[in-house]
Image (cartoon, rainbow, N blue to C red):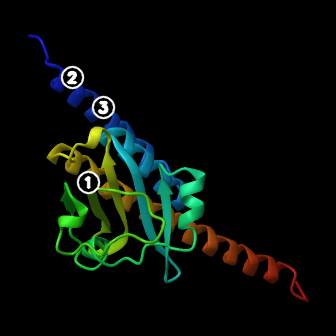
Amino acid sequence: MQHTALEKQLVIQQDQLAQAVIALAQGVDMKSILRHVGELSMDLTGARYAMLSYVEKGKKYYIPLGMSDEELALLASNEPQGIGLLGLMWEKHEVVRISNINAHSKASGFPENHASMTSFLGAPIMFGEQIEGVLYLTEKKGGRAFTSIDETIVRTLASACAVAISNASMIEQLKTRNAELEGLLAGKKNAPGK
C-alpha cells in the first residue's frame, strides 16, 4: 500500500505532536514551556508568527515568536490589549480560525507598527475551567489558510500546555513550601535551650 504525500505528512505531524506532548510533560519552567509550545505550533502548522500570552500575578505577559529584532523593537511599546479576536479566546474561551483577520466581526486591528497579517488560528490554554493563557498563530506560509488539521494540532498543544503549566505551578508551590518548612525546622534546631 502506497501512501500519498498528504498521508506521509500527517504521519510525520502525528509523530511530532506525540513527541511534543511527551516533552511538555517534562517541563517545569512556564516561560520555556510556552516558548516551546509556540515553536512547535509554528513548525507543525507552517505558521510564520506565534504569540503566547499568559497571566502571572495578575498581569498579562506576551511571548512573540517569528518576528525579527526590528519588528519586536517597533512593537515593544504596543503590546496586544487582549480585545477583539484575543478577547474571544481570553473571555469566551473560543478557538478562532479565520482566513482573513480583517473580515472577522470581532477584529480590532493591529497595534501601531505591527507586521501585516491575514490568516489567524488561536486557542485558549485551559486547565479545567481556568484559563492559563492563549496561543495564537498568524500567516501560514505560502499565504494559505489554516486547516482543520492545524486547528486540531493547536488545540492539542494548548491542552498539553495547560497541563504542563499546572504541573510547573504545583512544583514551584511545593519548592516554596519545602523551603518554608526547612526554615522552620532550622529555626527550631537553633532555638535557645535546644
The residue identified by callout 3 is: 15
Label 3 sits on a secondary structure element that is helix
Q: How far apart are marks 1 and 3 (CA)?
A: 25 Å
Q: Is residue 89 visible?
A: yes
Task: Compare marks 1 and 3 and give the one earlier in the sequence.
Answer: 3
Q: How far apart are marks 2 and 3 (CA)?
A: 11 Å
Where residue 50 sits, quadrant-wise, is bottom left
The residue identified by callout 1 is: 119
Q: In which quarter of the image is the N terminus?
A: top left
Identify the residue shown where x is 26% and y is 46%.
Answer: 153
Instruction: Mark 2 vs mark 3: give the one in front.
Output: 2
Task: Compare marks 2 and 3 and give the one earlier in the sequence.
Answer: 2
- Residue closest to the eye, 146 or 100: 100
Label 2 sits on a secondary structure element that is helix
Where residue 194 sits, quadrant-wise, is bottom right
Neighbourhood count class around disc 1 (C-alpha, 10 Å): few under 14, some 14–19, many 20 upward: many
Identify the residue shown where x is 27% and y is 71%.
Answer: 85
- Residue closest to the eye, 52 or 112: 112
The residue identified by callout 2 is: 8
Residue 57 percent across, percent down from the top left: 53, 81
Residue 132 percent across, percent down from the top left: 38, 70
